[in-house]
Amino acid sequence: MCVRVGRRRRPDVDAIRPPTRVVGLGEARAIRASANVEDVLVAYGLGSCVAICLWDATAKVAGMAHVVLPGADPAGKPNARFARSALPELVAVMQAEGAGRDPRRYVARLTGGAQVLALRGSGSAPRVGEQNARAVQDALVEAGVSIQALDLGGSRGRSVWFDPREEGQIRVRAIGSTDRYL
């Protein structure tokens, strides 16, 4: 049963839309697939940010990190805000849900990393989306995580949904387009 505080339940809409666990800027979340859990991980409005979606097929655990910046955490700690520090935090939250310890058993799907702001003039500005995408891919390769699908770059923001009942597949919707499954 779905209970929503402060809003009248609309069976016509709520019955077809599973509950979501929003993964905000710099956050990492994980959920395990089970018969009584209908939650879906979602990151809305990815521009230059990159969503790392990890799947542990053996444990049926889905994890998502919403990476904001291309570097590493200044304190050297696991931190989903930074591309070079996101994987350790994401693995930790996945392990709390029952995922395995070895990140090499995970598969990754990535989306985001767009250049959503049009820059004018002769100056060059850092392309944060490209930097985020590259740094995330490098971190995954270094950890031995297989990257199965990419939807990176371009000039349009995206939203991504990760339902652990869909065996690691993610649904991506770019602004102005239809859903794609990766």
Image (tube, rainbow, N blue to C red):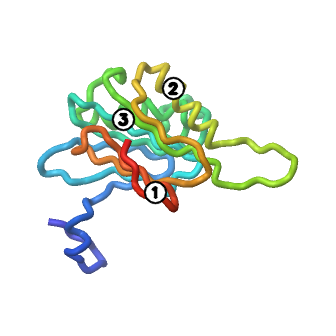
Nearer the N terminus, badge 2 or badge 1? 1
In the image, what residue occupies the spot 58% across and 31% down? 135
Q: CA distance from mark 3 to mark 1?
A: 17 Å
In the image, what residue occupies the spot 41% across and 36% down? 109
Q: Position of residue 148 (x, y in %)?
A: 39, 30
Kindly identify which residue carries mark 3.
54
The answer to whether mark 2 and mark 1 are in CB contact below 8 A is no
Q: CA distance from mark 2 to mark 1?
A: 23 Å
In the image, what residue occupies the spot 21% across and 28% down? 58
| Residue 56, placed above or below residue 119 | above
Identify the amino acid type marked 1.
Tyr
| Residue 83, placed above or below residue 46 | above
Identify the amino acid type marked 3.
Leu
Q: Position of residue 29 (x, y in %)?
A: 36, 44
Q: Categorize mark 1 by other alpha carbons within 10 Å: few (<14), some (14-19), many (20+).
A: some
The answer to whether mark 3 and mark 1 are in CB contact below 8 A is no
| Residue 103, placed above or below residue 38 | above
The answer to whether mark 2 and mark 3 are in CB contact below 8 A is no
Kindly identify which residue carries mark 1.
44
Give me the disc on residue 60.
none
| Residue most extreme to the bottom | 8
Q: Is residue 30 left or right of residue 144?
A: left
Q: What secondary structure is marked by label 2? A: helix
Q: Categorize mark 2 by other alpha carbons within 10 Å: few (<14), some (14-19), many (20+).
A: some
Q: Nearer the viewer, residue 168 or 142?
A: 168
**Quarter of the figure with the C terminus:** top left
Q: What secondary structure is marked by label 1? A: strand
Kindly identify which residue carries mark 2.
139
**Quarter of the figure with the N terminus:** bottom left
In the image, what residue occupies the spot 31% across and 23% down? 105
Nearer the N terminus, badge 2 or badge 3? 3
